[in-house]
Image (cartoon, rainbow, N blue to C red):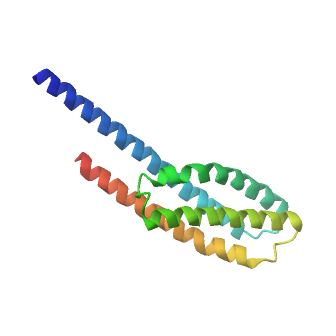
């Protein structure tokens, strides 16, 4: 009987450790998305006149963004309930940011060696990215604090 209880206890402990580790890696991935968004923002705001170089950087960010777009909802579930308004809104904001980046990229391609005329895209990215970064940071911190409470 005691042996069964020990085995059960070890199993529960192992299972919870795995779950906490998985949540931790999802949180780490969300921090990577946060860094990606900050990199994206600094790239599009940068106005050094070299649109060819910027086009290459934006294309790289687009590719990375496509990967993140698929994984973002999975990682977000580690910090938010899938049914919550915040979860849906953060997913939507991330998608809108990537769509706006695609528009910005096409503007760069259409007018090589010129800064795009459509400042609305830049304005949207400049306003939306910091808000989403703050939300990611906030919910990751809450999840980390909750995880620490459960382990101590």
Image check: 115 left or right of 12?
right
Which quarter shows the N terminus? top left
Residue 56 figure quarter: bottom right
Image check: 82 left or right of 51?
left
Residue positioned 23% across, 29% down in the render: 10
Task: Point out residue 55 in the picture as x, y percentages from the top left corner.
Answer: 80, 59
Furthest-front residue in this view: 83
Image check: 60 left or right of 117?
left
Task: Point out residue 99 in the picture as x, y percentages from the top left corner.
Answer: 69, 64
Q: Nearer the viewer, residue 34 or 6?
A: 6
Above or below, comparing residue 19 to residue 9 in the picture: below
Image check: 29 left or right of 18?
right
Task: Point out residue 126 in the picture as x, y percentages from the top left corner.
Answer: 63, 73
Residue positioned 45% across, 44% down in the render: 25
Task: Point out residue 114 in the picture as x, y percentages from the top left corner.
Answer: 87, 71
Furthest-left residue in this view: 1
| Residue 50 visible in the current orientation | no
């Amino acid at each position: 009987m005691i042996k069964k209880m020990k085995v059960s206890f070890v199993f529960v402990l192992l299972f919870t450790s795995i779950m906490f580790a998985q949540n931790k890696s999802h949180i780490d991935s969300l921090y990577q998305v946060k860094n990606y968004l900050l990199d994206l923002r600094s790239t599009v705001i940068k106005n050094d006149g070299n649109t060819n170089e910027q086009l290459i950087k934006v294309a790289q960010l687009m590719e990375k963004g496509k990967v993140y777009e698929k994984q973002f909802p999975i990682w977000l579930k580690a910090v938010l309930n899938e049914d919550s308004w915040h979860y849906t809104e953060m997913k939507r904001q991330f998608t809108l940011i990537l769509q706006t980046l695609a528009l910005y990229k096409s503007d760069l391609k259409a007018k090589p060696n010129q800064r795009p005329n459509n400042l609305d895209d830049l304005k949207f990215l400049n306003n939306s990215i910091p808000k989403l970064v703050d939300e990611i940071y906030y919910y990751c911190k809450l999840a980390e604090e909750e995880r620490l409470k459960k382990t101590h």
